[in-house]
Image (tube, coloured by chain):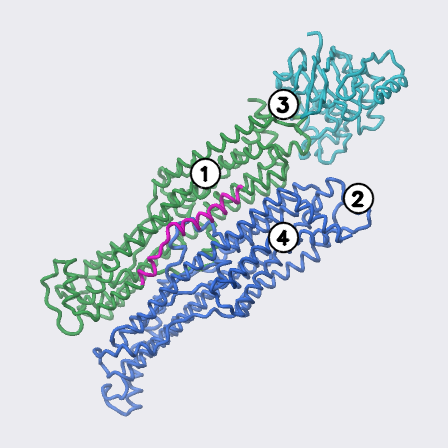
Chain colours: A green, B blue, C cyan
């Protein structure tokens, strides 16, 4: 044990004296801090934008009150008045932004047909979303493996290449002890850095302290251990530094870029989502056909869904709001199956990825991070469902006014339901990902140890 | 002598089984990416073609309707994929595929590929451009890192130099040899891509597509050349192969992984994007109250009314020979489109400012320069997307105004009942989209083009001059 | 425990090549054994076998009575080794390098003591606190000697230790070896240097194609006689 400490002390001395390694470590630290800054600013901006929506809604209500000074027809209000369905970020979202920049985090809703409003997009700079987020998850998933590779690619080969190994091994110490000490030193450094950054991010982002602190730190720890295992495995091949560097970078490239890109192709082919365009076209067709259909027919169809309004008066004349909103809603009913199909296909896509991510540890870990931060596709789909339910409740709020032909007064704005949805973590995905991660780590170390056994240690 | 060194590099590289294995992998990936790209292109294009045809048919065969109802019925613009976008998806996966075009409203482009994917898509897509931009440089690094260091380590450098060849000549000879090797890896894939493009892909054999494809290839060749020279120079400046390799890999990571993301993120942090909700509220406000707070919607309507009454010298709107509803609607459309356009341009301007950070960083990073140029040529960059949106908006505006005009001329004031015959809609030309010419695409990327040329000049002058400094002993 | 270093029918085969053929050898405490031979004769193989860096194909090597192959780590407590070209950690100073290796060997010297070892090995005091990256080969060699001396081992294994040293340093080195031998260290030195072998050696062995072909007491020989004998063995 004393020898171990001595070895670690000299690893530190060597590390301290190596400018290249210091720069690499400092760069990673800096990148991590920038990632934390970026993630928190981005989420803060989303929070501010969401808060500003309340102001817009209030503004809109004021405008309505001016436009309709006295009692108003609820149909007019439903048409001109808009509210927002909002998807508040989870407190952990700043650590892993996931798809929160691609998918809109609020929807402007009117009482009209829902399906024509549900898929509107936010103002997005495509180059920015193409380039992706420089958040802490990116630093941990992409850059930490590179730091580990940079620190470990010549863990043994450097000793051979600079010729110090014979002298070192002429001391009463064994090779595994030397490699173990070197790995331990690097692990302490990297894990220290990774855990420090994670804790900083948690404090900075003011996360809700729950079981996720443990999961996050555990995942970070295991993920780093996985890459150390890979480095250990390559070191066990006992090749020169250049070979190790190319091999390790090759593994990194394979796991973080090539396999995910191939998986993407596979998922797109295996689980296509053709419904979107069909949905948008059909929805328009049905809604607009509503104008041309006999009103009685439309109303009867509507009453089948809402029998409680059946007894309301017959529609007279060219236009009545309750008829208008009835066929708007029937538009949604007509594409219900398609819409469900569409969302289920998206969910199935996500499920497929969750199955396939055993092929790439980084994809798995990114998935765990996003699941914990509630920033991936399922959480967006949950938001869409919540927004749909909100739309239902809006309709149900307005229907008594429309069908009982009650005037909508200024006081009635306050009674209108408001929407709030907060992305919630997906623990099931996180836990199953964690299990897969543990298996991957064990597998790598088992293979590496086996290789070390099989390969005779050579000094030169 | 230079020729014989170039030949030596070429031959000995081809005999290096590890390099050959890597090249075969890269080549296979390149071919796979070509086929995958084409498949995805065809699927998406067919989907959008079908959708576009469907909505076009629906419009011309729509029932008898009141013109304003038809204006609200509207149409859709489905963005066709540019024919060589199968080589570089660029931003296409992140931009919406369909725009619903109706009266009074400018809708967003919806249903992007990225919104239909889980976060897996953020790891990147398997495209030809990805292989060319990221993997070939890595292959080049692997090929060239030992260019000089190996000669130093084995001591052959001194022997070569004692034969009367200069370091610079040697550098050029090596560059020539390596260029040939890279060409051998890349050429089959590019040839296949061209064949697929022109052979039987069912593409239009437009001259413009040829120019785009040729420029696309040219930019990549320059990019590879820059990487070859850079790698040879770095090798010359190092004493040991392993340190040269590590330096080059570090450069690669910085160029291809870290700076592109950092630059795009920095841009977005520096220039705040307004939310769509805020933008719509602002547009609404300005349309209602007038751009400068004067001349509100109601005042404008009143002024128009007075103007028309005076012009036709009548007392009431009913007496007008034209339909005031249609004219007022046309005026409203004109006003709101104008205001929207201003805000849209402002938004586009913000995005362009954000993106300019990436373009300027291209001066420091040839990867970014080639990425912009590549997307530009493939028609999958920001400008092409905005161009499509503008075309869609233009079509929407014209269609609405044409319908307003019909209402103004064929219907009476206050008439909300009359339905025009379905024949009327056959007069409308459906939405078609033409990709702008190659020259236009290139013009959007002059900065990146400059960055590329700057790099080319820098590595071949300053870089080669640095080689003279290499320590022989 | 009569012999500090011993080989019994020690053989090593690399692929098909027989690198060492049935070496039998005993070295006592205080003895200096010089092994002469051409490049590739098997000298380094012999040393690597004693160091446990390679495992014998048959036979056994013993250090201080312990079989090397079965006590790879243990035997290193009793031996010190100076390679032909001493390579050290370039980012550490000479003093730090010595401190590292001594502490690994279980010694806890003070800074003054370490300095003393370095200076006694011929390294200028001012050089000791500079980084090894800037050292000449001779300076590194002296640090290597200090490392070996500071270990106070029973056996000293030397692989061409004087190559690259200037004549003065070589002489100093010879004196050092004699001092160590007086103190009871058994020394095994592989070398090309016939004259120095004669000068310091207790016995001189000649190795050819993996075989120890002759062992002579150095004191019985004149230098030119040894050279003649050596050349004879090489050219038969």
Q: Which residue is mark 1?
A: A220
Q: CA distance from mark 3 to mark 4?
A: 50 Å
Q: How would you rate the neighbour count of disc 2 (Cα within 10 Å): few for under 14, some for 14-19, many for 20 or more? A: few
Q: Chain of mark 4?
A: B
Q: Which residue is mark 3?
A: C104
Q: CA distance from mark 4 to mark 2?
A: 27 Å
Q: Quadrant of the N terminus of chain C?
A: top right
The residue nearer to you, when weighing A137 against C211, is: C211
In terms of secondary structure, where does tag 2 sit?
helix
Q: Chain of mark 1?
A: A
Tell me if I can see residue A146 in this picture.
yes
Q: Kindly indicate whether the residue at mark 2 contacts the one at mark 1 (C-beta within 8 angstroms).
A: no
Q: Nearer the viewer, mark 3 or mark 1?
A: 1
Magenta extent: A251-280
Q: Which residue is mark 2?
A: B159
Q: CA distance from mark 3 to mark 2?
A: 43 Å
Q: How would you rate the neighbour count of disc 1 (Cα within 10 Å): few for under 14, some for 14-19, many for 20 or more? A: many
Q: Kindly indicate whether the residue at mark 1 contacts the one at mark 3 (C-beta within 8 angstroms).
A: no
Q: Is residue A205 left or right of residue A10?
A: left
């Amino acid at each position: 044990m004393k020898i171990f400490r001595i070895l670690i002390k000299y690893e530190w001395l060597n590390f301290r004296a190596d400018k290249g390694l210091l720069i690499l470590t400092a760069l990673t630290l800096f990148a991590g801090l920038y990632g934390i800054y970026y993630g928190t600013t981005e989420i803060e901006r989303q929070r501010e934008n969401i808060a500003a929506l309340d102001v817009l809604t209030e503004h809109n209500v004021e405008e309505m009150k001016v436009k309709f000074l006295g009692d108003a027809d609820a149909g007019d209000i439903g048409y001109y008045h808009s509210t927002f369905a909002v998807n508040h970020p989870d407190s952990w979202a700043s650590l892993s932004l996931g798809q929160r920049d691609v998918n809109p985090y609020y929807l402007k809703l009117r009482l009209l047909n829902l399906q024509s409003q549900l898929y509107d997009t936010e103002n997005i700079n495509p180059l920015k979303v193409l380039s992706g987020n420089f958040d802490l998850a990116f630093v941990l998933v992409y850059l930490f493996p590179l730091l580990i590779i940079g620190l470990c690619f010549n863990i043994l080969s450097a000793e051979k290449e600079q010729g110090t190994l014979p002298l070192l091994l002429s001391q009463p110490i064994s090779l595994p002890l030397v490699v173990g000490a070197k790995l331990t030193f690097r692990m302490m450094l990297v894990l220290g850095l990774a855990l420090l950054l994670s804790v900083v991010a948690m404090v900075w982002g003011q996360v809700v302290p729950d079981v996720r602190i443990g999961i996050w730190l555990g995942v970070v720890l295991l993920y780093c251990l996985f890459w150390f295992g890979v480095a250990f495995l390559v070191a066990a091949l006992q090749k020169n530094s250049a070979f190790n560097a190319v091999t390790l970078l090759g593994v990194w490239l394979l796991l973080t870029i090539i396999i995910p890109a191939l998986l993407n192709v596979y998922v797109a082919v295996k689980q296509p989502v053709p419904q979107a365009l069909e949905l948008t076209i059909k929805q328009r067709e049905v809604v607009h056909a509503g104008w041309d259909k006999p009103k009685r027919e439309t109303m009867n169809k509507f009453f089948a869904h809402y029998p409680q309004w059946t007894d309301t008066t017959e529609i007279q004349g060219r236009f009545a709001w309750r008829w208008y909103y009835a066929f708007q809603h029937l538009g949604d009913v007509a594409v219900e199956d398609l819409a469900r199909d569409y969302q289920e296909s998206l969910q199935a896509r996500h499920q497929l990825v969750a199955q396939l991510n055993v092929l790439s540890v980084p994809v798995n870990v990114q998935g765990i991070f996003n699941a914990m931060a509630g920033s991936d596709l399922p959480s967006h789909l949950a938001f869409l469902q919540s927004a749909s339910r909100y739309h239902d409740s809006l309709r149900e709020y307005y229907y008594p006014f429309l069908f009982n032909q009650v005037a909508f007064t200024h006081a009635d704005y306050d009674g209108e339901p408001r929407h709030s949805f907060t992305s919630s973590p997906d623990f099931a995905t996180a836990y199953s990902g964690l299990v897969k991660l543990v298996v991957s780590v064990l597998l790598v170390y088992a293979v590496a140890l086996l290789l070390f056994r099989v390969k005779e240690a050579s000094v030169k | 002598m230079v020729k014989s060194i170039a030949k030596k590099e070429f031959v000995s590289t081809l005999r290096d089984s590890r390099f050959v294995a890597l090249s075969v992998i890269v080549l296979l990936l390149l071919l796979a990416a070509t086929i995958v790209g084409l498949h995805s292109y065809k699927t998406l294009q067919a989907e959008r073609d079908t959708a576009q045809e469907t909505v076009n048919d629906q419009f011309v065969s729509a029932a008898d309707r009141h013109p304003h109802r038809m204006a609200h019925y509207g149409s859709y613009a489905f963005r066709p994929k540019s024919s060589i976008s199968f080589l570089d998806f660029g931003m296409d996966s992140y931009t919406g595929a369909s725009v619903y075009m109706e009266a009074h409203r400018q809708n967003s482009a919806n249903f992007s590929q990225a919104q239909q994917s889980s976060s897996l898509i953020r790891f990147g897509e398997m495209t030809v451009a990805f292989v060319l931009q990221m993997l070939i440089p890595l292959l080049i690094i692997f090929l060239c890192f030992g260019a000089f260091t190996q000669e130093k380590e084995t001591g052959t450098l001194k022997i070569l130099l004692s034969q009367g060849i200069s370091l610079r000549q040697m550098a050029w000879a090596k560059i020539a040899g390596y260029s040939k090797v890279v060409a051998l890896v890349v050429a089959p894939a590019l040839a296949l891509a061209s064949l697929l493009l022109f052979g039987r892909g069912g593409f239009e054999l437009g001259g413009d597509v040829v120019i785009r494809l040729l420029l696309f290839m040219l930019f990549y060749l320059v990019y590879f050349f820059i990487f070859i020279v850079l790698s040879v120079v770095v090798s010359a400046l190092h004493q040991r192969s392993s340190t040269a390799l590590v330096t080059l890999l570090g450069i690669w990571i910085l160029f291809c992984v870290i700076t592109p993301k950092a630059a795009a993120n920095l841009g977005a942090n520096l220039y705040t994007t307004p939310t769509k909700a805020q933008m719509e509220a602002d547009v609404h406000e300005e349309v209602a109250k007038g751009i400068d707070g004067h001349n509100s919607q109601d005042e404008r309507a009143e002024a128009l009314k007075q103007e028309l009454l005076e012009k036709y010298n009548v007392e009431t709107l009913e007496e007008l020979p034209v339909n005031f509803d249609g004219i007022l609607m046309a005026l409203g459309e004109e006003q709101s489109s104008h205001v929207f356009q201003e805000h849209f341009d402002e938004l586009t301007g913000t995005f362009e400012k954000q993106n300019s950070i990436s373009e300027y960083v291209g001066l420091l990073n040839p990867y970014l320069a080639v990425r912009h140029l590549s997307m530009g040529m493939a028609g999958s960059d920001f400008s092409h997307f905005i161009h499509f949106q503008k075309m869609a908006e233009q079509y929407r505006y014209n269609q609405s105004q044409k319908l307003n005009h019909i209402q103004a001329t064929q219907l009476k004031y206050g008439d909300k009942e009359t339905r025009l015959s379905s024949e009327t809609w056959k007069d409308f030309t459906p939405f078609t989209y033409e990709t702008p010419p190659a020259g236009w695409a290139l013009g959007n990327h002059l900065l990146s083009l400059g960055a590329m040329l700057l790099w080319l000049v820098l590595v071949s002058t300053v870089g080669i001059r640095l080689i003279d400094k290499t320590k022989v002993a | 425990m009569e012999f500090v270093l011993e080989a019994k029918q020690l053989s090593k085969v690399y692929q098909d090549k027989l690198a060492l053929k049935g070496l039998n050898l005993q070295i006592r405490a205080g003895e200096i054994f010089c092994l002469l031979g051409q490049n590739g004769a098997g000298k380094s193989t012999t040393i690597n076998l004693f160091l446990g860096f390679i495992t014998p194909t048959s036979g056994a090597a013993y250090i201080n009575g312990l079989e090397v192959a079965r006590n790879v780590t243990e035997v290193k407590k009793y031996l010190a080794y100076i390679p032909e070209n001493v390579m050290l950690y370039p980012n550490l100073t000479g003093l730090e390098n010595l401190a590292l290796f001594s502490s690994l060997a279980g010694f806890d010297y003070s800074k003054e003591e370490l300095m003393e070892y370095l200076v006694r090995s011929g390294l200028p005091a001012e050089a000791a606190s500079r980084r090894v990256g800037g050292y000449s080969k001779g300076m590194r060699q002296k640090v290597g000697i200090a490392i070996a001396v500071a270990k106070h081992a029973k056996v000293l294994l030397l692989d061409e230790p004087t190559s690259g040293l200037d004549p003065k340093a070589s002489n100093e080195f010879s004196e050092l070896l004699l001092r160590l031998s007086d103190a009871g260290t058994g020394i095994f030195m592989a070398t090309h240097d016939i004259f120095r072998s004669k000068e310091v050696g207790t016995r001189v062995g000649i190795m050819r194609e993996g075989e120890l072909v002759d062992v002579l007491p150095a004191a019985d020989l004149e230098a030119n006689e040894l050279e003649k004998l050596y050349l004879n063995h090489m050219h038969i």
